[in-house]
Amino acid sequence: MFLKIKKIPKVHWSSEKPYNFKPKFSTFFFLCFGLTLFGLGEGLLIVSFTGASPWSVLAQGISLNVNLSIGIITLLVSIAVLILWIPLGQRPGMGTIFNALIIALMIDICIIFVPTPSNYIYQLILAIVSVILVGVGGGIYLVSNLGPGPRDGLMIGLQKVSNLPIAAVRATLEISVVGIGWYLGGTVGVGTLLFAFGIGPCVALGLYLVDKIFN
């Protein structure tokens, strides 16, 4: 059962080492493909107007209390998360760098070119699709083993320490983040809750599908 997955599977296009800066083409392709789906999902969630992802809610909540822009807060939160990697034994790699670049690009593309559905039911459907895309995309790029993004690296490090299923670790992390963001004044919507509760199982599903298809 995919909800019980506790480790990132290895397939034939996975990098042998996460700190490989000269990967084979197939590894680099799936890294970029996974991150593109991830960024597309993040962008579609914003476009759906049903609520931002938990980390965006956190950034918004902090910005309301320290008089800094959401963009600056997002950067500072990412740096803070990377610092938390140190006691967990995590190190950045190529995937960490491309995570920031590709996801940011896809979010901008969605905001510019994808219109918000006028019907609320369609907005909810778009939000559900976006969470699935983020989860599956996250699973694909993690399997490439070229280094996780800041938040995924935190998830992996916490999983190793706790030995809990990835789905449980990710869900706990997202729910905690959105709770803090909401307490600080960040806006929470149905899409936010869908993301917080759904991203853990969706990442686990992405890992499971990649493992079944390529092994």
Image (cartoon, rainbow, N blue to C red):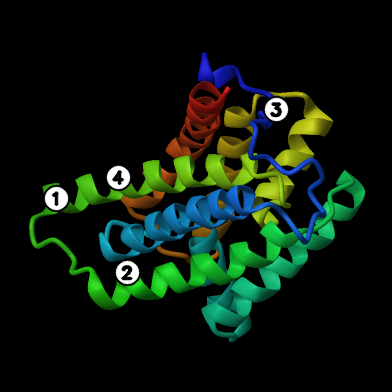
Amino acid type indicated by mark 3: Lys
* Mark 3: few/some/many CA within 10 Å (<14, 14-19, 20+): some
Residue depicted at x 59% and y 86%: 67
Instruction: Assign a secondary structure to mark 3.
Output: loop
Disc on the earlier residue, 3 or 2: 3
Q: Which residue has dot 1 on it?
A: 122
Q: For the view shown, which residue lies furthest in the left direction?
A: 119
Which residue is depicted at the point 84% across and 49% down? 90
Gap between marks 3 and 1, in whole Å?
Answer: 35 Å
Q: Position of residue 1 (x, y in %)?
A: 52, 13
Q: Amino acid at mark 1?
A: Tyr
Mark 4 closeness class: few <14, some 14–19, many ≥20 residues within 10 Å = some
| Between marks 2 and 1 in the image, the one whose residue lies nearer the viewer | 2
- CA gap between label 3 and label 2 equals 31 Å
State if disc 2 and disc 3 touch (CB < 8 Å).
no
Name the amino acid, label 4.
Answer: Val
Residue marked by disc 2: 110
**Callout 4 touching callout 2 (CB < 8 Å):** no
Which numbered disc, 1 or 4, marks the residue closer to the eye? 4
What amino acid does circle 2 point to?
Answer: Cys
8 or 190, which lies in front? 8
In screen coordinates, is 128 left or right of 192? Answer: left
Above/below status of 168 relative to 18 = above
Sequence-wise, which precedes: disc 1 or disc 4?
Answer: 1
Q: Nearer the viewer, residue 75 or 172?
A: 75
Circle on res. 7: 3
Whole-angstrom CA distance, mark 1 to mark 4, is 10 Å
Report the Cα–Cα distance between label 4 and label 2. Answer: 14 Å
**Res 153 seen here:** yes
Label 2 sits on a secondary structure element that is helix
The percent position of residue 62, horizontal first and vertical second, equals 59, 71
Which residue is the site of mark 4? 129
